[in-house]
Image (cartoon, rainbow, N blue to C red):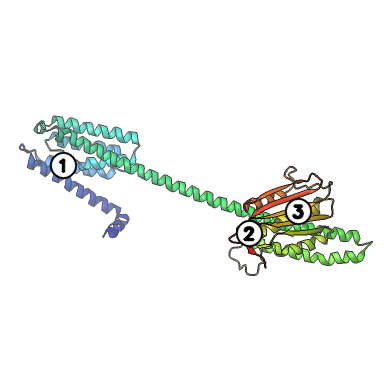
Amino acid sequence: MSTSWQRRAVTRPKTVEAVTLVLLFAVTVLGVVVTRAVVSDTPPVWPGVALAAVACAALRLRRDRPLHVLATTTLCTMGQGALGYLLTPGLMGPLLVAQYSTSLHTSRRTTWNSALTAAAGMVVTGLLVPSFRNSPVLTTVNPAAWVLLSAALGAYVRVRREYAVARAEHADRQREEEARHRVIQERMRIARELHDVVAHHLTLADAQAGTAAHLSRTHPDQAFEIIARLPETTAAALRELKATVGLLRQDNDTADLAPAPGLQQLPDLVDACSTVGLVVSVTVEGQPLRLTPVLDLTAYRIIQEALTNVAKHAATRTAQVRLAYTPHYLTLTITNDTASDRPATTPATGGGFGLLGMRERAAAAGGTFHAGHRPQGGFEVACALPLNSNDESPAT
């Protein structure tokens, strides 16, 4: 029944409004009848009914012109009181509804100013009624209290609605901020992946082509061997680019995409660096652990970017990679031994995003990152990535 009534109230608002006003008019007329029953000097009936009809008819405009409707119902109620009717809550129904509607649709100051004015009108009317001079509670206190109570109820409902709207707007803004933050984070992650893939493989391809051109006259066999391995570098770049760009295509089947690289591909990375004349030595300390995919990719990308920087910017042709496993951390250290290196991707120079991307990767994994010149010469990249002992297990 309740659901059916609510559905009708939504689909037929004018019908519901008319029925409500008719019921309110009936309650007001009942108040007139009650007055005739309790007052010895019975006031006339039809003036009271006419004033009730005018007050109820005016309520149709209570949402558009709340103050005008409140003034009309107040005057009608005062007229009924002046005729000798007892101002009961039933008789004051149109005034109470108008005051409640005024509290809903006006400011707090307007609400209470109008409520005090209407309450004062009820007090003045009660004092002028000769039939109830011996009962000030019925003539003054009771009508004024009902008016103020109606105003308070309307103000409370208005505050609750404003609070609900404010909460909904805040929730919407918070959801938008969270969605925008997730988009930015995802965009930055993809940007790091693209930078690492392009910077590494294109650096190797450029170095291989330059080395082959340099050796083409003096050592043609070595030059042909380097050229023969050049397609492997470009093919690896295409595979990783396809995997990275595939993340942006939500509707495509990603079953044919290559898996994200990890430390298992570290020997291939060392071998690729050797084709451009960079000799990389890898040292592993502690018991190697099977890392989570995110941590495995983070460690691989940091090593890859560090070795790419060595190949691009360092005068030395050697680099050392150290992986240290402890119960709680995986420490990566990449160094090159020369005092003449000049890493152009340091944040101070602002010339690239290599070190910035490594720092962001380490921070995203909850680790620490440091890069800088060594006191004894050369450059060092050090990173400590936290391990979750519950999820990590010895590598097989």
Density class for disc 3 (Cα within 10 Å; few <14, some 14-19, many ≥20) is: many
Q: Mark 3 is on which residue type? A: Ile
Q: Can the viewer see residue 201?
A: no
Q: Mark 1 is on which residue type? A: Ala
| CA distance for labels 2 and 3 | 20 Å
| CA distance for labels 1 and 2 | 80 Å
Disc nearer the start of the sequence (1/2): 1
Disc nearer the start of the sequence (1/3): 1
Which of the two residues, 214 or 97, is positioned nearer the viewer here? 214
Q: Can the viewer see residue 84?
A: yes
Q: Mark 2 is on which residue type? A: Val
Residue 218 in picture, x, y percent from top left: 94, 61
According to the picture, the residue beneath numbered tag 3 turns out to be: 334
Q: In which quarter of the image is the N terminus?
A: bottom left
User: Which residue: 36% across, 45% down?
Assistant: 161
| CA distance for labels 1 and 3 | 96 Å
Residue 382 in picture, x, y percent from top left: 72, 50
Q: Are marks 1 and 3 in contact (CB under 8 Å)?
A: no
User: Which residue: 75% across, 57% down?
Assistant: 200
According to the picture, the residue beneath numbered tag 1 turns out to be: 50
Residue 294: which disc? Answer: 2
In the image, farthest residue toward the left: 40
